[in-house]
Amino acid sequence: MIADITEGLIQEYQRDGFLKIASFLDAEETAQLRHAVEIAVSERSERIPGFADGGIIGDEYYDNVFKQRVNLWRTNDAVRRFILDARIGRLAARLAQQDALRLYHDQGLFKAPWANATSWHIDCPYWAFHSRDAISLWIALEDVTMQSGALYFMPGTHRSARFDNVMIGPNVGDLFRVYPEWASIPATCVQMKAGDASFHNGLTAHAAGPNMTPGTRHAYAAIFMPDGSRFNGARNVLPQKLFDALRPGDLLSDDDFSPVVFSHDQGHH
Ligand SMILES: O=C(O)CCC(=O)C(=O)O
Ligand SMILES: [Fe+2]
């Protein structure tokens, strides 16, 4: 696992709002993670545990974007060990330039053959907190090409993004009705080898093409939020019990649901 990063790459991440890290995992780590994530997804019929359908299964379009299973780390020990590895938290914190990060959620994102495109969107407006510094990790569990559903990013959009949004719908470009000023920015397509990964800011515009291959595109992703992030009233992936206990403005500091993955103060190096 790549655990260290140069100042230059941190600056690139801060400037563009995304960064590809080639060979983030070696072949054995990738095979192990893929195995764990495939098992974790197969163990779960609900998109979000304890959340019936998470408001989305049954949506003809979104169901065919990918098979999404959220919070795998809560139901699978191998996935939990992987994503709580201190090296990942430290790397994410360095890129995001944060003193402390918590895990918000992880997910398997399996794009089946002929799956729909992932329309242009920004992530943070969907979440239960608002932050300009949240950071997502997306790991290719096999080679991901422009044909099989590679991610596209729009450099720099994290700096002018707001927290209003469009839902991910069937129109690939609806986001640019909200952000016409982004419509002329060329996107970067990030193809990956198995084990490559990208980080992106929670406000960076991104998308993925449809899967035009006969194989499933397997990816695993996780989102980290700055420690000190506050509940904004949106339920998103929160379990009912936690959601019921929270009032807008409360800290999202439940150590069980949102564990600290890096803290400068706690001497995690
Ligand atoms: O995997 C995809 O197609 C989209 C992933 C995504 O939107 C994300 O990780 O935020
Ligand atoms: Fe996204």
Image: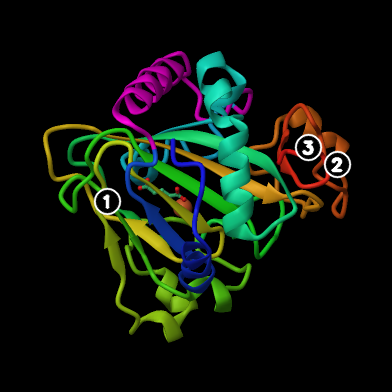
**Residue that mark 2 sits on:** 246
Quadrant hosting residue 245:
top right
Q: Which of the pair 139/28 is nearer the observer?
A: 28
**Residue that mark 3 sits on:** 243
Position of 229 compared to 13: left or right?
A: right
Three-letter residue code for mark 2:
Leu
Instruction: Residue 219 in the image: state x and y as whole percent.
Output: 36, 37
Three-letter residue code for mark 1:
Ala
3 or 1: tag closer to the N-terminus: 1
106 vs 32: above or below: below
Answer few, some or many: residues within 10 Å of disc 3's Cα (few below 14, many 20 plus, some between 14 and 19): some
Taking the magenta stretch, the answer to whether it contains residue 43 is yes
SS at mark 2 in the image: loop
Three-letter residue code for mark 3:
Phe
Position of 179 compared to 25: left or right?
A: right
Instruction: Residue 252 in the image: state x and y as whole percent.
Output: 80, 44
Range of magenta residues: 25-51
Instruction: Residue 23 in the image: state x and y as whole percent.
Output: 33, 42
Q: Which of the pair 268/171 is nearer the observer?
A: 268
Taking the magenta stretch, the answer to whether it contains residue 237 is no
User: Badges 3 and 2: C-beta atoms under 8 Å apart?
Assistant: yes
SS at mark 1 in the image: loop
**Residue that mark 1 sits on:** 150
User: Badges 3 and 1: C-beta atoms under 8 Å apart?
Assistant: no
Instruction: Residue 234 in the image: state x and y as whole percent.
Output: 71, 50
Residue at 27% over, 61% down: 189
